[in-house]
Amino acid sequence: MVPNPAERQSAPALERGADQWLPVVVFAALPTVGVIAGPSYAPMVFGLAIVRLLLGLWQTRRFPAIDRDLAWSAAVFVGLCWLGIAWSIVPGRSLHGAMQMTGIVAAVLIFLGGSPLADRVAGRLFPVLAFACLLGAAIVCIDTLLFYPLQALLTGRPALSAATKYNRGVDYLVLIVWPVLAYVWWRHRWQRTLLLAAGIGAALVLGSSAAGRAAGVTGAVVLVLAFRAPRMVAAGLATGTMLLAIALPFTLRVFAERHTALVPYVKPSGIHRLEIWDYMTARVLERPVQGWGILSASAVPIRPEELSSYIYVSSQGIYPHNQWLELWLETGALGAAVGLAFAVLVLVRVRRLPETLRPFAYAAFTSAMTVSCLNFEVTTDSWWAALAASGFLFATLGRFVTARISSRIGS
């Protein structure tokens, strides 16, 4: 395919623009700065979205190409958040949550709708990001082996307390490393692939994030299965996601009601989760359609008879440690349905990627689903920034690989 003269003239200017090269700088910071301070994902990713929006308006007078399907599902969920204020048990907190979700959704849509990266820029982005991911993993490993002097210095907290400051960054690192692994695999850089996988694996083993380890393991299992049986994995993930979204509160209810009998067999943190899920699944069944209002999870009532059987849960309340349960609890069946629609949309988009990239995209999807079942509130802005970053990288890599395949066929 030969570009016309106008495209040939505009390409160098496009590739030299800050709109193109700024993402390379920001993405290099995500696995390094981001692994040290996980919450920094939000200002870095969403700040990049705003800067690219302003540069795009200045250069082309055009707004971002908003993904309509994604925008519709996002708009319905945000609408539910605002509508839920009317029956929320903590309307002030729900108002804050609705405003927060509105801002997050807008930032994600703007970020994903930015102008695509030129092939030359994309070809530089992934090698830089591969090095940055290795560097981020090395930071976690070295600081952990030295008993956290870096985190203790940055946070001013004792080493044992500072250790958990890596958890969020490690969880997010798992999400953004999959497209990078896909790139080095596609380029047949076998040594780099093994080195990168080993580095991330070491950070997961040495780090203290159980959610990150679970996400890495489940993603790796799905990656292997997707190479061997891609159709089975695609169908299995779609079916599993539907069952998770629909049946989760009722399934959790069965296990959570037996938390006292499981005390001798489950570690304390597991019993704590079961106690949380016990009273929260009970509250879901009390308001299954409309929920209790966004950001209300820590304020839902805990009955005296429930508290009397708990060891770790107190009357203070806490977030659910499971985003799908949170959707049911705070936004009801409608919110869970929107979450399911979003997940299915992501799986549909994976099918549009070049075949060689799909196993890694399925692995990333699985890792994200695993983390969503173990950590973070739905309104966590850095969580959505990490998801958006992973999606952006897969979309960019998909265009890059497709262009290379087309150019080989054309020649």
Image (tube, rainbow, N blue to C red):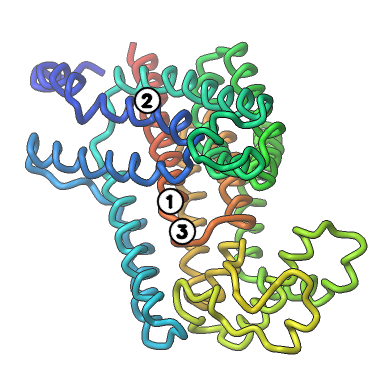
Mark 3 / mark 1, whichever is N-terminal: 3
Marks 1 and 2 close (CB-CB < 8 Å): no
Distance between mark 1 and mark 2 Cα atoms: 24 Å
Please name the residue shown 47% across and 50% down the image: 383
Q: Secondary structure at mark 1?
A: helix
Mark 2 / mark 3, whichever is N-terminal: 3
Mark 1: give few (<14), some (14-19) or many (20+) Cα within 10 Å.
Answer: many
* Mark 3 residue type: Phe
Marks 2 and 3 close (CB-CB < 8 Å): no
Nearer to us in this view, 157 or 146: 157
* Mark 2 residue type: Phe
Q: Which mark is residue 400?
A: 2
Question: Which quadrant of the figure has residue 112?
Answer: top left
172 vs 274, left or right, is left
- Measured from the top left, where is residue 63 in percent x and y? 15, 47
130 vs 216, left or right, is left
Q: Quadrant of the N terminus?
A: top left
101 vs 188, left or right, is left
- Measured from the top left, where is residue 97 in percent x and y? 39, 69
Between marks 3 and 1 in the image, the one whose residue lies nearer the viewer: 1
- Measured from the top left, where is residue 13 in percent x and y? 13, 20
Distance between mark 2 and mark 3 Cα atoms: 25 Å
Marks 3 and 1 close (CB-CB < 8 Å): no
Q: Which mark is residue 342?
A: 3
